[in-house]
Amino acid sequence: MQLDAIDLKILAQLQEDSSLTNVELARRVHLSPSPCLMRVKTLEAAGVIERYVALANARALGKGLNVFISISLKEQSRESLAEFERRIAEHDEVMECYLMTGDSDYLIRVALTDIGALEKFILNQLTPIPGIEKIRSSFALKQVRYKTALPLPGRAG
């Protein structure tokens, strides 16, 4: 789908605040409500807009410990990778999971309450997954930047 300047303005506004009413969104992008809604529906249908979410505050929910865990598997077969991915997706603590290049097969980010919760997660949730060879953890001391909005073409950032 080719995005024009108005589509990009709509995306920028919705990435900033997806709770905007169509009337307010239309006002901000200088359209009348009906064409604005049609453009949003087109962006949704094309998969440019995947979904709408509310971002919760991890600290307010007692999940202020961010841990990045590198996981190496014993073998790289399609079956072992698929099994690991299926098993890791079962855990709500896992916020992100990436298949990596280089020394580690996977990098996950988990949101936990404290170091005791990390110990339980590693011992009770990770180590029972078959095929894991190595687990290495790194703690986030400070969140320097966190954003959810993707950079859009023709816009700074």
Image (spheres, rainbow, N blue to C red):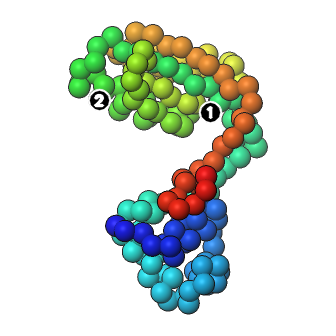
Q: Is residue 41 left or right of residue 31?
A: left
Rendering coords of residue 32 (x, y %): 56, 90
Check disc 1: other Cα within 10 Å, few if <14, some if 14-19, many if 20+: many
Mark 2 Cα-neighbour bin, 10 Å: few <14, some 14–19, many ≥20: few
In the depicted structure, whether residue 137 falls above or below residue 57: above
- Where 4 falls versus 157 (above or below)? below
Look at mark 1 in the image and give the residue it sits on.
Answer: 111
Q: Where 95 falls versus 56 (above or below)?
A: above
Name the N-terminal-most of marks 2 and 1. Answer: 2
Give the quarter of the image for residue 128: top left
Q: Is residue 124 visible?
A: no
Question: How many marks overall?
Answer: 2
Residue 36, position in %: x, y? 51, 82
Residue 130 position in % (x across, y down): 35, 16
Q: Are marks 2 and 1 in contact (CB under 8 Å)?
A: no
User: What amino acid is labelled 2 in the image?
Assistant: Ala
Residue under numbered circle 2 = 82
Look at the image and tell me whether residue 31 can be seen. Answer: yes
Residue 44 sits in quarter: bottom left
| Residue nearest the observer in this picture, 19 or 16 | 16
Residue at image point 58% right, 30% down: 110
Residue at horizontal 58 percent and vertical 25 percent from the top: 68
| Mark 2 residue element | helix
User: At label 1, which amino acid type do we have?
Assistant: Ala
Residue 87 badge: none
Q: Secondary structure at mark 1?
A: strand
Q: CA distance from mark 2 to mark 1?
A: 23 Å
Which residue does the image show at 61% across and 68% down from the upper left? 13
